[in-house]
Amino acid sequence: MPRPDWERFRPPAVIGHHEYGYRSVGSTMDVAWELAEAGAAHGTCVVAGTQTHGRGRFDREWVSGDSLLASVVLRPSASTAPLLTIIGCLAVRDAVRELCGLRCAIKWPNDVQVDGRKLCGVLAEGRIYATGTTGAGVAVLGIGLNVSLDVAEHPELAATATSLLAETGRSIDLRTAGDALFASLDAWYGGAEPAALIARWREAIDTLGRRVSVRVRGSNATLSGLAEDVDAAGRLLLRTDDGVLHALDEGDVTLAG
Ligand code: BTN
């Protein structure tokens, strides 16, 4: 693991109790995985000023620039592990509200958006290690929140992304943003009761009730239909025009028409 440029401690918080900070890394995900493999405690965080190889879902490039770039080592129970993206998105939404009063919606499955533009992406990666018959799960939850990112400097993002600065005109310090995010994650993770989480997830997703196309990675197929609901595991329930209800746990959603 590279030597951190700073360390911060936030007792008595669990998530964010120990933050390793870097001016620049390849990806905070990789540093967090190194820490996790070396036995870092649940809730250990890695933040970076910039990333040279930031990644999003499906290994897509994640552009960094005046953003909160964070990864958190988590050691979830088997029932919490599938809910990490949900916890991450809901925590970001509350942190943003707390930081600047901005209301965000969720685009299923992992985007936090304002008026259809992406403000933040959440990436959950998990590994399971066999220990006898029970197994021990470790996860890294990555969050990229566009704080003062100037989307105009990134033509490929200009039409689809936004930042807190662009939305509010306010320049928020990354340290303040990190404090709000980790406090919110700590609260959401600590209080996570699955049925209540899913109820909040359903309320927050603005994809529901709309016609969408979903590109499903595993099968390489695209399904079109009505995004009816989410199920008890947070999966998207998509009714295709032939009347079949599909429960999707991943995919790229495009709003139709
Ligand atoms: C997505 O929308 O596909 C998820 C994007 C996640 C980006 C964050 S930035 C901090 C952390 N480090 C990475 O390399 N990726 C995540």
Image (spheres, helix red, strand yellow):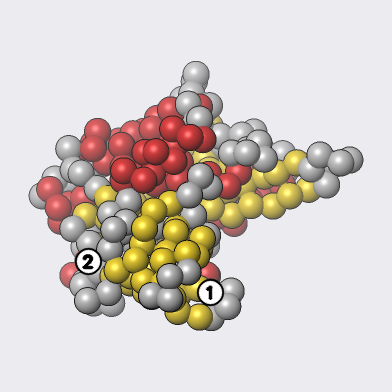
State left or right for residue 106 relative to residue 101: right
Under circle 2, the secondary element is helix
Amino acid type at mark 2: Val
Vertical relation: 16 (above or below) 84? above
> Residue 121: x and y, percent?
39, 56
Numbered marks: total: 2
- In the rendering, which numbered label is found on residue 251? none
Q: Which residue is mark 2?
A: 151
Residue located 12% across and 48% down the image? 168
- Residue 109 percent location from the top left of the image: 42, 57
Question: Looking at the picture, how far across and down is residue 248, in whole percent?
Answer: 51, 62
- Percent of width and height locating residue 133: 86, 41
**134 or 169: nearer the viewer:** 134
Q: Residue at x 69, y 52 (%)?
A: 127
- Residue ID for mark 1: 217
- The alpha-carbon separation of the residues under discs 1 and 2 comes to 27 Å
